[in-house]
Amino acid sequence: MIKKDEDPNSHGSGRLKRNMSIKSAVSPFVVLALMVFIWWALCNFNIFPSYALPSPEDVLKSFREEIIAGRLINDIIASLWRVAVGFFLSAGLAIPVGLWLGQNAASRRAFLPMLNFFRFLSPLAWIPFAILWFHIGDKPAIFLIFMAAFFPLVLAIMSAVANIPNIYFRVAHDYNYKGFDLLTKVTFPAVLPQIITSLRVVYGIAWVVIVAAEMVGCQDGLGYGIWEARNGLRLDSAVCYMIVIGILGMCIDRLLIQLTKLPSVRWGYER
Amino acid sequence: MKDNQLTTRLSLENVSHGYGEVPVLQNLNLTVKPGEFVVLVGPSGCGKTTLLNLLSGYLKPQSGSIQRSGIIRTVYQHDGLFPWLTVKENISMGLRLTEDKKQHENELRELIELIHLQGFEDHYPHQLSGGMRQRVELARVIAGDSDILLMDEPFSALDYQTRLRMRQELGRLLEKRPRTVVFVTHDIEEAAQLADRVLVLADRPSYIKRELQITSMRPRNSTDDPVVEATKAILSEFGLQVNENSKKEYISR
C-alpha cells in the first residue's frame, strides 16, 4: 500500500479528479444557460412575434402568477395522482401477465401478435372511447395512461423471462424450487433488473401521455393547463407548464433510478 | 447432516443417446460406487456433458436404463450461482431442508469457514473472483444432505494456478464430507490427481475406451508418481504420449 502523502502523484491527481468532477457537475448548467440565452436572443431579435414565442421574462412572470393563484400546485398534484394510478395499475397487471407469458411458450405465441398490435396504437386513438366509457374526471386520463404503459411493459417483461439463462432453472431444480417458490425466488429476481429498467422506460411514456390524456374530461392537471393556455393564446403559461412537466419527469426518474441501487439487482447493471 | 454412510446408487445400463441423427453415446455401461470419485475425460464434443445430463436426469436416454438414488446436485463451469443472492444466501440454498434455525446457522458458518470465505458472506457473486465463486458453488453442493455431485468442468474457466488450488480444495472438502462424485474434465492432469477411477471416452459416438483405477491415497500432488503415471497412461490413450510407458505398479486396469 502506498501512503497518500508519500505518493508524489496523489496530490496532483486528486486535484485533477476534483477539477474533473466539478467540471462534469457544472457542464449541464452551462448548456442550460446557453439554451436560455438562445431563447432570450430569439425573442430579442423578434424572429417570432411575441405572442408566438414568449420571452423568458414573460414565462417567469406567469410562473409567479400561477404559483400565487395556487393553480400550479393543484395541477401538479392532480397530474401526479393520475400518472401514479395509471402507472401502478399497468405495472401491477403487466408484471404478473409478463411473468406468466414469459414462462409459457404456447400462450406467448398466442398472445404476442395481439400485444404487438395494441403496442402500436397511439393512446390518442383511445381518446373517444375514454370519454364515452369513463366520462369525466380522473378515470379517462388514467385509462389512457394505462393503455400507453401496459403493452410495452408486458412485452418487455415477457421477453426478459423468456431469456432467463436455462442454468438458473437447472440449479433451481437441483435445490427443489417448485411452483410459487420457483416464481418468486428464481424467475422474478432473475428478471428484476430488467423489470426496473422497463418501469423507467414505461414511466417515461406515461408521463409524456399526460398532456394528451388531460385533454379529455379534466378540469385540472398539467396537461389541461397547456390546453387551456393554448385556448387563451397564453403561450407564456404553456411554456411554464412545459418546464414543470419536464422537471417533474426528470425528478421522478431520479427516484426510479434509486431502485437500481438495491444490492440484489446490482448484478444486472454491472456485468 | 448426512453421516458418512453413503448409500447412493448411480448406474447406466446399455445407454445410447444422440441428437437427431447424430449418435453421441453408444451402449454405455457404468456403475458408480457409493463414495467413489469417477472422472470422465475425453476430447471436446465427445459427449461428456451429455453423459452428465443423462446421469442428472436432465436428459432421457434414447435407449437403455439409468438407475439413481440419492440427492443429486450439479456444479457447472460458471454462472451457476444465483447473482441476486449473497454468498451466504447461495450456500443456504443447499440447506433449504434444514429447518432448525440454529443448526442452519452453524452449518452455514462451518461451510463458509471450510471454503475460507469468512468476511465475504454478504458479497454478491459478481463481486467475487472466479475461484471464489467456484468455492461458493462447492460449499453449496456439499451443504445439507446432497449425496451425488455431478461436476461439469467446474474449474476449466479458471486460470491455471487457481485451478490447481481448487483441486486441493475439492479434495479437502470431500475428505470432510464424503460424496459420490462424477467429474467431467478435459484436463488430464486434473483427472489423474482427483480420481479413484478415470474413464477415457472415445470420440463420437462415445464409448468407454479405457478404465484406470488409481488406488493411491488422496490428497495427491500433481507431481506424485501415481498421478504422473496415470497422466501418461491417459495421454497415450489419446495418442499424445510419445514413448509408451509400461510401468504398471501403481495403476491396475
Image: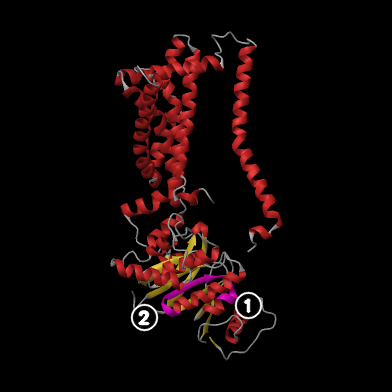
* B199 in relation to B129, above or below: below
Residue wearing tag 1: B235
> Of circles 2 and 1, which is in front?
2
State which quarter of the image contains the N terminus of chain A: bottom right
Crowding around mark 2 (Cα neighbors within 10 Å: few <14, some 14 to 19, many 20+) is few
Circle 1 chain: B
Crowding around mark 1 (Cα neighbors within 10 Å: few <14, some 14 to 19, many 20+) is some
Residue nearer the viewer, B116 or A150: B116
Does the magenta run of residues contain B186?
yes
Q: Amino acid at mark 1?
A: Leu
Residue B238, image x, y percentages: 62, 75
Residue nearer the viewer, A249 or A14: A14
Instruction: Say whether residue A124 is visible.
Output: no
Q: Amino acid at mark 2?
A: Asn
Which residue of the protein is positioned furthest toward the left in this rendering? B100
Circle 2 chain: B
Q: Is residue A205 left or right of residue B234?
A: left
Residue A80, image x, y percentages: 38, 28
Query: Magenta residues?
Result: B175-190
Residue wearing tag 2: B4
Secondary structure under the numbered disc 1 in the rendered image: helix
Q: Residue at x 59, y 75 (%)?
A: B188
